[in-house]
Every structure is written in structure tokens, then in C-alpha cells.
Amino acid sequence: MQSEDLAKALAPVLGDRILGVEPFAKTAGRLRFRADAALDVFRAVKEDLGFHHLSMVGGIDWVSHREVFYVAWSDRLGQYLLLSTDLPADAPHIESATPVWPSANWHERETWELVDITFDHHPDLRHLLLPDGYVFHPLLRSFKLHEPEELEVKKRSV
Amino acid sequence: MSAPPPQLPAKVAPANAESYRLEGDLPMVDHPAVPFVEIETVRAQEFIPAAKEALSALIAEQGQSKVIRPTFNWAGRNSLFPLHWGLACCAIEFASAFSARWDSERFGIVPRSSPQQCDLMIVNGTVTWKVAHKLITLYEQMPEPKWVIAMGNCATGGGPFRTAYSVVPGVDKLVPVDVYIAGCPPRPEAMIDGILRLEDLIRERKE
Ligand code: SF4
């Protein structure tokens, strides 16, 4: 399936909730959508186009804004589809994809802790890779690597 | 005629029974429906302090001995049981040290899967803050006397990930370490050498 066919198939269902479909290497295309219509777009992509499997969710910090993207797979087409949307840099949040694709659960937890994008109505938004109570978001551009602080070396008692 | 059965002690808690209670009440102590458990508990409360006292006296006396302590150390250093686990890439070298080619079992080093059967923890890989409290739990479950070997650059000081956001800069910040092995990863020979150095430490052990 080409990106023009995708745009044609989705236009009657979603109307202006999608901002455009661009060709993207090795995928069916890159679908840009409006963040406030996220759930409708996910449903349409899953049920109307048959992208039943969500293989990853990720985020990018572009400093001026954040981007969140989803990669869905269709067994019938044998193709990936990229969905992406831009979020404001301060307090970025988007509706969780877990009602549509349950596999989004852990990917969204990871995106939340690393790139600080909040997923509304997520069933279990906790730390996945980082320890509980970790306050930084290490994949943001503003996060600087540093020498670890001097910690006390433990000594044997016996 | 056989002798009469020994009399069980009366069902009274000793005066210092309170000090053996855990946080809150032990439900079985005051429960009238289980007299056997109650008697056993009262007995244990009398027995434990006496046994502790006798044992520490024995250790204090024999710790100085020219026979008991060296024998103890000899047995200990020739049957080191490391914990069988792996944290990162160094675990591959750890595993090959027990393969046919290097065969660490000839030194009496036998990896065990439960920390309660181990006296040596070889930290073979990168320790992240996420796994730190699990490492401490495993360490605390090991019976005394116990030793720790930091294997590889990651365990000794954070290694290539020292400045990373999620890595403990050296496992000696969590538990006391006896021997450090450098290398990324150390070869199995280096790991065996580290264990032999630990055996030297145990040979000198007085306490
Ligand atoms: S020291 Fe090197 S080989 Fe060992 S765990 Fe660290 S990175 Fe891996």
C-alpha cells in the first residue's frame, strides 16, 4: 500500500483529524495526526486499515516541541505504518493508546520516564526501566551526563 | 518399666518473654487452641539465649585456637560456593569459567542457585540502581561468613557506563567488597585468580 492509497482510505473516516500522509522509507507511510484526536485515529488505523499490532511507541525531544510516534504492523499488508504527532514542549500529554493496542502499555511507560510525555488514562503509569522515585527524564536534551557524586564505600564489619 | 515421660515446663512465659516478640504480637503464643506450639515457643525462648551465650563463648575461646580456626579457614577456602547469577556481559566469562576448559570446580568452587547456600557473591556485570536493592536483598540472605568479589570494570567502578544516569558507580557503594578484578571483561583465568586471592585472605582470617 502506498501513502496516497492510505490517505484516500482514511480521508472519509477521519477527515481533518489527520494532517497528512507522507511517504517514509520501508513503511506504508508516515501519518501525521492531530494530538487531540489520537484515539479516533488509532481506532481507524487498527480497525479500518487492519494494523492490528503496535510494535513500538517512542518520543523525540526536538527542544522546541516533542514528537511522539507509533509504529504499527499489518499482517495482511506485510507493512509498517508510522504515526506521529507534535506536542508542546511544556507539559506534553496525549491520550494513551492502551484501549486500542494493549501492547502500548510498557512502551508508554518507557516513553513517559525517558522523554517526559504523559499518557492520559494510562492504566499503570509507573517507572519501567528506571528505579522508582527517579526524578529526571534522561533522554531529554536538557539532561547532562555527569561524574557520579562521591558515595560512601561500604566496609566489612567482621 | 520404662521411665515416666519427661515433664514439660509449666505454661508460663519467662519474665523476659517480651523481648522475643516481633513487632506486634506473635499470634501463636497466646492462642489457647494450640498448646503444643505454645509450649515449644516458651521452650525456645528459654533455649535461644542460653544457646547463643554458649556458642559465642565457644567461638571466643576457639577463635584464638591454633587448631580450630585454621581448620575452619582451610575448609572454608576450599569450598567456596558462589551465587549462580549474571548481571551483564561479564556473566558470560563467569559461565565459561565453570565450563570444561577452565573447570573451576577443581578448586571447590561450585555455583549454587540459592543465596542461602552461598558464601561468595561474584558481582559479574553492570549494577543499575533498579537492581541495587535486589542485590542487597540477595547479599543479606547469604549466611555469614560471606565474601564479595567485584568482577569487571562495571562492578568495580561503573566501567564504561560510569557517567550514565542509571548505573551504580561501583558495587562497593552497596555492599563491602573483598577482591576487585579489573578487565572488560576479565578472562576466566583472571576470575579464578581473583578467587585464589580471596582464598589467601580467608587463610589469614582471625575473626
Ligand atoms: S566490565 Fe565490560 S564486560 Fe563486564 S559487564 Fe561491564 S561492560 Fe560488560
Image (spheres, rainbow, N blue to C red):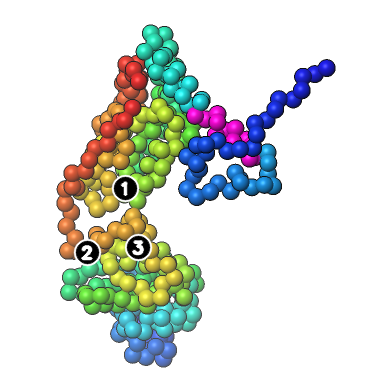
| Along the line of sight, the residue nearer the viewer: B126 or A46 | B126
Q: For mark 2, does the 10 Å Cα neighbourhood hold few (<14), some (14 to 19), or many (20 or more) residues? A: some
At label 3, the amino acid type is Glu
- Determine if marks 3 and 2 fall on one subunit: yes
Which residue carries the number 1 mark?
A: B128
Drawn side of residue A28 relative to residue B4, left or right: left
Q: Is residue B37 above or below residue A108?
A: above
- Determine if marks 3 and 1 fall on one subunit: no
Q: Position of residue A11 (x, y in %)?
A: 38, 89
Q: Position of residue A143 (x, y in %)?
A: 19, 60
- Chain identity of mark 1: B
Examine the structure image and report whether residue B58 is included in the region drawn in magenta: no
Q: CA distance from mark 2 to mark 1?
A: 20 Å
Q: For mark 1, does the 10 Å Cα neighbourhood hold few (<14), some (14 to 19), or many (20 or more) residues? A: many
Q: Which element carries disc 3, helix, strand or loop?
A: helix
Which residue carries the number 2 mark?
A: A140
Q: Which mark is residue B87?
A: none
- Determine if marks 2 and 1 fall on one subunit: no
Q: Residue at x 41, y 42 (%)?
A: B137
Q: Are marks 2 and 1 in contact (CB under 8 Å)?
A: no
Q: Quadrant of the N terminus of chain B?
A: top right
| Along the line of sight, the residue nearer the viewer: A34 or B131 | B131
Which residue carries the number 3 mark?
A: A110
At label 2, the amino acid type is Leu
Magenta region, main secondary structure: helix
Q: Which residues are magenta?
A: B37-49
At label 1, the amino acid type is Thr
Q: Position of residue B10 (x, y in %)?
A: 65, 34
